[in-house]
C-alpha cells in the first residue's frame, strides 16, 4: 500500500539515488507485551478485517495456531508454545509478523525498484504494483515473514497499517487488543513504556525480562517485551541475534558491481588486444601448405 | 565463392550443428539479458524487453530450460573432441604465444585447442550449476522443496556461475572475431585449408588421411 507520500520515503529497493530527505518524521514502533497477551487472537481478526483479507478455512491438527503459518492472507499470527520452566508450565504466546527492521533484509534483496520502501517513520512497506514476484524478499528476511501469493505472484506481509498510521491512527491490531498487550507510539515512547513493564516483570521474579529490539538488524519497529529475553528462541523460534544472512549480504552487496565491471573489463581487454596485436589472419603460405598436404584434392 | 577457388575447403560443422549452436546462442543471450535485468538495479530497465518485471521473472527460468536442452545437444555433439590431452597442457603453458599470434611456437592442435576445450567445459559446468540452483530459485513451482538457507546459497551460486558464464561467452565471441576465418565455420559450415593448417594442423592431417583412406 502506498498511502504515505513519496516525500516520506527513506529507502527504496533497487534504487541508488538519495531518496527525498527534506522532511523527517518521528520513528514509530509497535510494542507487543508478551506477558500481557491472553492469546484471544483479536489482533489477528482485526488484521483480517481492516485489510479485508479472507483466509481459507483450514483443518485442525491439534495446535492452537490457526492457520498453521503466516500466509499471503494472514499477515499476523498468534504462535503458542508450552514451556516447562522447572515444573511451572508457562504458556508463551507471541504475535508473529513483520518486525519492520531498521535495516530490512527484504528491501536489500529486492531487485525491483520501488517494490519495497521504508518510510521515514520506520515502516517497511511492499508496493504491490512494483512487485515482480521473484521471492528474493523471502531470502532476505531474517524472520521468515514475506509470503508469495499463488494467485497473483505478489509478496505480502504486515504493513504496520501504514494507511492508518499516515492519518494518525494506531494499527488495527493495537486498537483491537483487549488487554493492551499491543501499544503503538513513537519508538522512544515505546522504549520508555517497555522499561516500566520490564521493571514490573523483574519484581515478579522474571530476572531475564527485557526488550527485544535486535541490534543485528538495526533495531526493529515492532518490539517485544519478553519474560525470557535471554532465550527468545523459546517463543516459537524468535531468532536470538537476527541479522541479514552473509550470503544475502554478498549477493546484494558489492558483488553485483564487481561482476558488471568484470564483464566490461573482459570486453575492453578483448578490444585492446585487437588494436595492439591485431587479428590472427590466415596467410597465403598457410593455404599453400594445406594444398601441398592434400595434393590435388579439392 | 570466387575467392575460394584456389583454396581447399573443409567441412567443419554440419547444418544440424550450426542450427543447434545458434539456437543455443540466441536463447542464451535472451537468458543473460533477462537474468542481468534482475541481477543489477542499473539494468532493471532491460525487463522492458520482455514486457515488464513480472514477465521477465516468469520467462527467465523457461529460457534456462531451453538453454539446458540446446546446450545438451551441443554437449552430445562435441564432448568427444573435448577431452583433455597432453598437448593441451603444453598449449596452455605457451598461452603467451597464443595471445601474441605466434602460433609457430605451439604444438600442433587437433579439432579443438585447449582454450576452446576450456570454454566447452566452463560452459558445461556453469550451465549445470545454473540449472540446479535455478530450480531452487524457481519459486513458482519449487518453492516448497527447499529451505530458505538453501535458497540463499542457490542465489549466490546462481549469480557466481552466471557471472563466470558471461565472461566465458565474451571470450568465446572475441576469439571468433580475433581468429579470422573462424566465423564461417559456424555460419557456412566450412573452413579453408589454410585456416586448418594454421590453427588445427593435427585435425587437418587427420581429415586428409581420412580422405586418402576412403579411396
Image (tube, coloured by chain):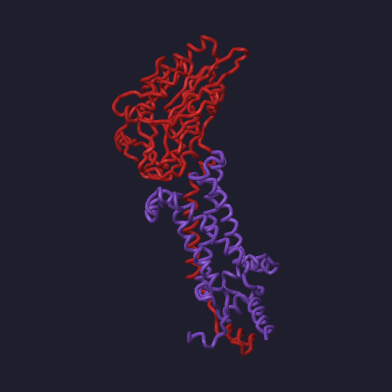
Chain colours: A red, B purple
Quarter of the image for residue A12 reads top left
**Left or right side of A61 for A147:** left
Q: Is residue B92 visible?
A: no
Q: Which of B60 and A248 is in front in this view?
A: B60
Residue A112, horizontal then vertical, whole percent: 40, 45
Residue B157, horizontal then vertical, whole percent: 56, 48
Q: Would you place residue A3 above or below residue B203 in this image?
A: above
Q: Would you place residue B1 above or below residue B43 in this image?
A: below
* Count of numbered circles on the image: 0
Residue A30, horizontal then vertical, whole percent: 40, 24
Q: Which of A121 and A169 is in front in this view?
A: A169
Which quadrant holds the C terminus of chain B?
A: bottom right
Query: At 60% across and 63% down in the image, what residue appears?
Result: B75
Q: Which of A68 and B39 is in front in this view?
A: A68
Q: Can residue A288 be seen in this view?
A: yes
Q: Would you place residue A58 above or below residue B9 in this image?
A: above
Q: Which of A245 and A253 is in front in this view?
A: A245
**Left or right side of B72 for A166:** left
**Left or right side of A282 for B209:** right
Q: Which residue lies furthest to the bottom in this view?
A: A296
Amino acid at each position: 500500500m502506498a498511502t504515505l507520500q513519496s516525500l516520506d520515503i527513506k529507502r527504496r529497493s533497487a534504487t541508488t539515488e538519495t531518496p527525498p530527505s527534506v522532511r523527517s518524521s518521528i520513528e514509530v514502533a509497535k510494542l507487543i507485551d508478551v506477558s500481557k497477551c491472553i492469546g484471544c487472537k483479536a489482533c489477528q481478526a482485526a488484521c483480517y478485517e481492516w485489510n479485508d483479507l479472507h483466509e481459507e478455512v483450514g483443518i485442525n491438527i491439534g495446535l492452537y495456531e490457526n492457520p498453521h503459518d503466516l500466509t499471503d492472507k494472514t499477515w499476523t499470527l498468534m504462535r503458542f508454545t508450552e514451556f516447562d520452566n522447572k515444573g511451572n508450565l508457562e504458556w508463551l504466546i507471541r504475535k508473529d509478523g513483520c518486525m519492520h527492521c531498521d535495516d530490512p533484509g527484504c528491501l536489500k534483496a529486492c531487485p525491483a525498484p520501488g517494490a519495497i520502501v521504508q518510510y521515514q517513520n520506520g515502516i517497511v512497506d511492499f508496493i504491490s504494483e512494483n512487485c515482480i514476484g521473484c521471492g528474493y524478499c523471502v531470502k532476505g528476511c531474517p524472520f521468515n515473514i514475506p509470503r508469495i501469493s499463488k494467485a497473483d505472484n505478489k509478496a505480502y506481509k504486515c504493513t504496520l497499517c501504514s494507511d492508518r498510521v499516515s492519518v494518525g491512527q494506531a494499527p488495527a491490531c493495537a486498537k483491537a487488543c483487549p488487554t493492551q498487550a499491543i501499544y503503538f507510539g513513537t519508538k522512544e515512547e515505546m522504549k520508555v513504556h517497555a522499561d516500566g513493564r520490564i521493571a514490573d516483570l523483574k519484581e515478579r521474579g522474571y530476572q531475564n525480562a527485557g526488550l527485544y529490539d535486535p541490534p543485528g538488524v538495526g533495531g526493529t519497529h515492532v518490539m517485544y517485551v519478553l519474560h525470557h529475553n535471554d532465550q527468545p528462541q523459546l517463543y516459537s523460534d524468535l531468532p536470538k541475534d537476527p541479522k541479514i544472512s552473509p550470503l544475502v549480504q554478498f549477493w546484494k552487496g558489492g558483488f553485483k558491481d564487481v561482476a558488471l565491471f568484470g564483464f566490461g573489463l573482459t570486453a575492453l581487454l578483448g578490444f585492446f588486444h585487437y588494436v595492439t596485436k591485431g587479428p590472427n589472419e590466415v596467410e597465403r603460405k598457410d593455404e599453400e601448405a594445406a594444398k601441398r598436404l592434400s595434393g590435388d584434392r579439392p | 565463392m570466387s575467392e575460394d577457388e584456389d583454396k581447399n575447403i573443409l567441412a567443419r560443422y554440419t547444418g544440424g550443428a550450426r542450427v543447434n549452436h545458434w539456437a543455443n546462442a540466441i536463447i542464451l543471450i535472451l537468458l543473460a539479458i533477462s537474468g542481468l535485468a534482475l541481477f543489477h538495479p542499473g539494468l532493471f530497465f532491460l525487463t522492458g524487453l520482455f514486457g515488464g518485471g513480472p514477465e521477465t521473472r516468469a520467462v527467465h527460468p523457461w529460457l534456462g530450460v531451453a538453454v539446458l536442452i540446446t546446450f545438451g545437444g551441443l554437449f552430445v555433439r562435441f564432448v568427444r573432441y573435448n577431452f583433455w590431452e597432453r598437448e593441451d597442457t603444453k598449449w596452455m603453458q605457451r598461452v603467451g604465444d597464443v595471445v601474441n599470434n605466434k602460433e609457430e611456437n605451439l604444438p600442433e592442435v587437433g579439432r579443438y585447442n585447449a582454450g576452446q576445450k576450456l570454454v566447452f567445459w566452463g560452459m558445461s559446468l556453469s550451465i549445470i550449476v545454473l540449472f540446479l540452483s535455478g530450480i531452487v530459485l524457481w519459486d513458482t513451482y519449487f518453492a516448497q522443496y527447499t529451505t530458505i538457507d538453501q535458497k540463499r546459497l542457490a542465489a549466490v551460486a546462481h549469480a557466481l556461475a552466471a557471472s563466470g558464464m558471461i565472461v566465458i561467452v565474451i571470450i568465446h565471441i572475441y576469439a571468433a572475431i580475433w581468429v579470422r576465418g573462424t566465423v564461417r565455420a559456424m555460419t557456412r559450415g566450412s573452413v579453408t585449408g589454410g585456416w586448418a593448417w594454421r590453427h588445427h594442423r593435427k585435425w587437418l592431417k587427420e581429415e586428409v588421411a581420412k580422405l586418402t583412406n576412403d579411396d
